Image (spheres, rainbow, N blue to C red):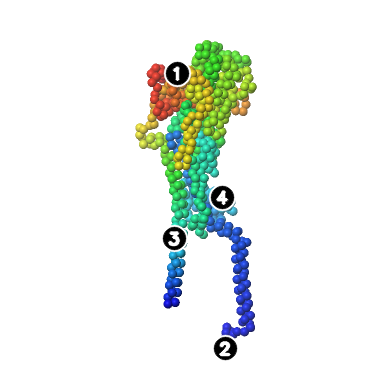
Amino acid sequence: MPVSGGVTGPTQRRRGSVILAAISLILMLCVGRLVQINTSLHTRLLSIAQEQQRGISVLPARRGTIFDTRGRVVSASRQLPDVFVDPSRVGDPAKLAEELAIRLNLSPADVAEKIKRRPAGRFIVIASRIDEATAEAVAAMHHPAVGLSQREVRSYPLIASMAHVVGFVGREGGGLEGVELSYDGHLRGRDGRRGAIRDGRRRSLWPADDSIIEPVDGGHIVLTLDAEIQRTVEEALQESVEEFEAEGGVALVMSPNDGHILAMACLPSYDANEAASQPVELRRNRAVTDPAEPGSTFKPFVACGALEGGFVSTFDKIDCHMGEYHLGGRVLTDTSPHGLMDIAQIITYSSNIGMALVGERMGAKALHRTIRSFGFGERTGADCPGEAPGIVYPLRDWTSYSTASVSMGYELSVTPLQLITGFCALLNDGVLVRPRLVRQLLGPTGDVVKSFDSPVQVRRAVSSSVARYMTCELLTSAVKEGTGKRARTEHYRVLGKTGTPKLAYRNRGGYEPGAYLPTFIGAAPANDPKIAVLVMVRRPNARKDYYGGKVAAPAASRIIAEVLPYLGVPRDDDEAFVSEGPTE
Amino acid sequence: MTALRVGVLLGAFTGLALAVVHLRSEQTRCAFRTLAQESRCVELRRELWRLQTGVARLRAPQRVRDSLDWFQTDLVTPGFDSGRRAVRLAMDPTIE
């Protein structure tokens, strides 16, 4: 029996040659392909491989924390998970939507709609900022299409308190309002990165060759505000707003010597944790953005200018025409009729006619100079974004009525911050000091980078003697005997001035009937003021009351009575005053 | 003798190869552990931030006040009660 395998001959040799040639060809093709892969395709394939194998892990940096002056946290960052879905790995969308909806307390239809909306996408956020328990429940699903990604979220433990001052951050983590915006560069951290080789399941297996970039946390900020004082001020303001059914209000507490703002409250306020959903109108810090005519609270500044320039002396008697005075075509009136009064009585009883006549004596030029010297018509330089400069018309635009109007606090507008800053110059022996909201900038580890504790003196607005006379005599008398009686407190002597300016129409000239801005600006203790207080209640129900002495002064009284003991300021020993003051 | 030498050499190479494999696997394990520790570090930082914001919420003045009310203690911040009393007095209409 012939055995074909054992037969040798030309046929077999030919077959052998063919097979050898085929193998050689295949080998050559393989070598050629290898050469091609390692030369012309090398770069592209290497990048594809690296993309598949290498991953970048972000090492999150933390945005700096904002503290109040006593170290309470006002704003801090944390991370909360978002739930996302990769539609390419979903499988059964309806089933997944139902499972997710149960865990996230959402409607299955909504979840399904979100998944279907972008079928080509790889990252669809289903729910944001979920709590830890929900995140655990979602992670326990172990669904390949469902994942959790961490996102930095700003938390405001004081909720609505200080919301207008501190501001808020946007979704990308940048400051959008308030201190968060003005110090964004200092607060913002820089995320780190770490490269890693990943396995087939995308788990980090091996550190990549490139060096690690460490995260750099943001710096911290210490405010001049005190959360306890802020709460007191907000409560007092809220009481007034509710009692007089007002539209809102602004209140400020400032330390006159160093310009530190201890409280800055705006009502209505908003929850800073939900800032994005609040209307823009509500988020505005009206203490710095909304100028208004100051009315009678402006009279002390004009009186100072008149005394300083020698246009009026402390003994001069001015005829107040029994409450009605014709100036050109206009009629000026006082709330109660007065005859001859000196400058002290004019301030104490807040006579419009008396102040208009003082203004006439000064003349437009001196009056304008006085106004500007107290910082009106220019930004205070406080670290508040969006600060308005107020309106002080240039001299060339003044009419024949302007000196009288401006002397009564009309025909110009000032922000609440400007008003209290100017008032603090009177309390500070006539020196205008720049207001401050930030006390210290700290580094990420808490080291002091910059301190703003020392006051910044802007200029001398008025001489020391005139400023002292104004505060110790005239403004003290205005609270003791005049329109500001309700600002008195049991244990501290208070000085101050009331105002009841009318509110102008927003879009046209003239004043809204029945719309007022009752105001009180004052300080205590009168002999050595430690705090200045400004309370403005916007548009109270005029049928209830609208005078500054009745609407705003009680709130200021409460603030002074509560804040001074908190600051450890000893009670006044002026027995004479206490005996004359309110009794039970 | 030749077979013995070959055996020794093979054994030595095998041992060397095993050692290299072991070292390499150990190195991989350590690298993996390092990465895991770094991830843990990130998680711990995240947990720290969560706790810090939680503490901050508890230290908020209004929250402290609510807690004091809840525990029914007589503790108050100095001056606050006397202040309210003073306001009641100041609001007395007879002083106008």
Q: Which mark is residue A480?
A: 1
Contact flag, marks 2 and 1 (Cβ < 8 Å): no
Earlier sequence position, callout 4 versus callout 2: 2
The image quarter containing residue A318 is top right
Marked residue chain, label 2:
A
- In the rendered view, tell whether residue A68 sits above or below residue A36: above
Separation of disc 4 and disc 1 at Cα? Answer: 69 Å
Amino acid at pointer 3: Glu
What amino acid is at disc 2? Met
Whether residue A67 is visible, yes or no, is: yes
Specify which label sits upstream in the sequence, 2 or 1. 2
In this orientation, which residue lies closer to the viewer: A546 or A157?
A157
Circle 4 marks a residue in which chain? A
The Cα atoms of the two marked residues, 3 and 2, are separated by 63 Å
What residue type is disc 4 on?
Answer: Glu
Q: Chain of mark 1?
A: A
Nearest to the eye among marks 4 and 1: give it: 1
Q: Are marks 4 and 1 on the same chain?
A: yes
Label 3 with label 4: CB-CB less than 8 Å: no
Marks 3/2 same chain? no
Q: Which residue is mark 3?
A: B26
Provide the residue designation for mark 2: A1
